[in-house]
Amino acid sequence: MRRGITAMLLAALMVGVAACSSPPEASTAGTASLAGLRRIPGTHMYAMTFTGDYDELAGVPLPPSAKPFGCSLFYATGDPGRSVFARNFDWDPNPALVLHTDPPDGYASVSIVDLFYLGVPAGVDPLTDDDARRRLLGAPLLPFDGMNDRGLVVGMAADESGRAETRPDRPTVGSVRILRLMLDRAATVEEALALIDRFNLDFDGGPPLHYLIADRSGASAVVEFVDGRRVVTRGGPRWHALTNFRLAGSDATTRQADRRYATAQATLTERDGVLNREQAFDVLRAVAQPHTQWSVTYQPHSGVMHVVARQDWSAVHEFTLPMART
């Protein structure tokens, strides 16, 4: 496992430090990473490949969150060879980054980062602002969704009812940082679940979260925290969806009362979980909210990722992650 016991002790360094902290110093690898930074044309989003290693358990600036994340996610596996993971990130109008990483002792991945949580607010351009650009060196540590080259895909959404226990025998990581650990270390849903069990999750400074995790075998799981206990809801044979109510223990009435969940459920059920990328975006469009900041599909068999920024559905931006052979 990465960095052994010494690195695990660093997990206690939480990401809830002040946003005014100094940005990381650029190493040679960091300078090379920043040199490749570019804006995705016509969007509030940027793209960058992080070159070299990073300490996945180190602290990073994280301002407090006053409002819950929205978000709608689903995994459609009706066609076993062309499954698709789709997600709307519904939040404030902040700049965002599509990030490729390939750490020397972890899996390569592609993810999306809300740059506000690195101290880069709306209206600040990291291409022209040196301080903002240096802050992007912390981007690998805060993926809000992503896919690795083994076909694991992860995403999160707010769950205001979530309550995670704290055990003194476990190191603590932030509720977003756990996504980085999964992307770097887990190839399957089962490996991701085992990894979560090794840590306490800290929801301070932001809303409690729950997670949709999937892999290219078709397996998926929603992970939630109920009265301190981790509760896993396994995916059905064809699809799995998640919005902002607790899925564990919910009945049909509760699920139908949530417009976004019910809308996604109707299409996924009608199509028996068989959706291509365009059809997945149709569902994301149907459940989008006025504050949807990005919509993304991940295809774990091909490694292709498609992104739409702020509901500009006519402009779909494609990225590819070379997938490892299994």
Image (spheres, rainbow, N blue to C red):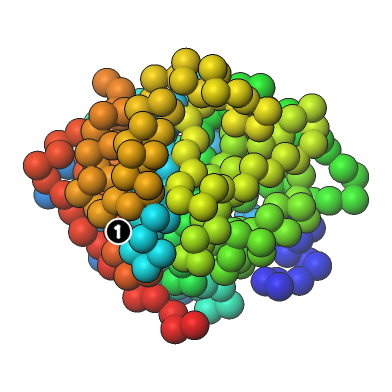
Q: Residue at x 78, y 55 (%)?
A: 198
Q: Which residue is mark 1?
A: 305
Q: Position of residue 180 (x, y in %)?
A: 55, 56
Asked if residue 162 lies left or right of residue 147, the reply is: right
Question: Taking the image as drawn, is residue 127 in sight?
Answer: no
Query: Which residue is nearer to you in this view: 76 or 244?
Result: 76
Classed neighbour count for the residue bearing mark 1: other residues with Cα under 10 Å, few (<14), some (14–19), many (≥20): many
Q: Residue at x 43, y 28 (%)?
A: 261
Q: Position of residue 162 (x, y in %)?
A: 68, 28
User: Residue type at mark 1?
Assistant: Met
Classify 171 as above or below 70: below
Q: Residue at x 60, y 59 (%)?
A: 189
Asked if residue 294 lies left or right of residue 236, the reply is: left
Q: Position of residue 174 (x, y in %)?
A: 64, 43
Figure quadrant of residue 175? top right
Q: Position of residue 8 (x, y in %)?
A: 76, 60
Where disc 1 sits, the SS reads strand
Query: Which residue is nearer to you in this view: 216 or 148?
Result: 216
Q: Residue at x 76, y 52 (%)?
A: 197
Asked if residue 185 lies left or right of residue 155, the reply is: right
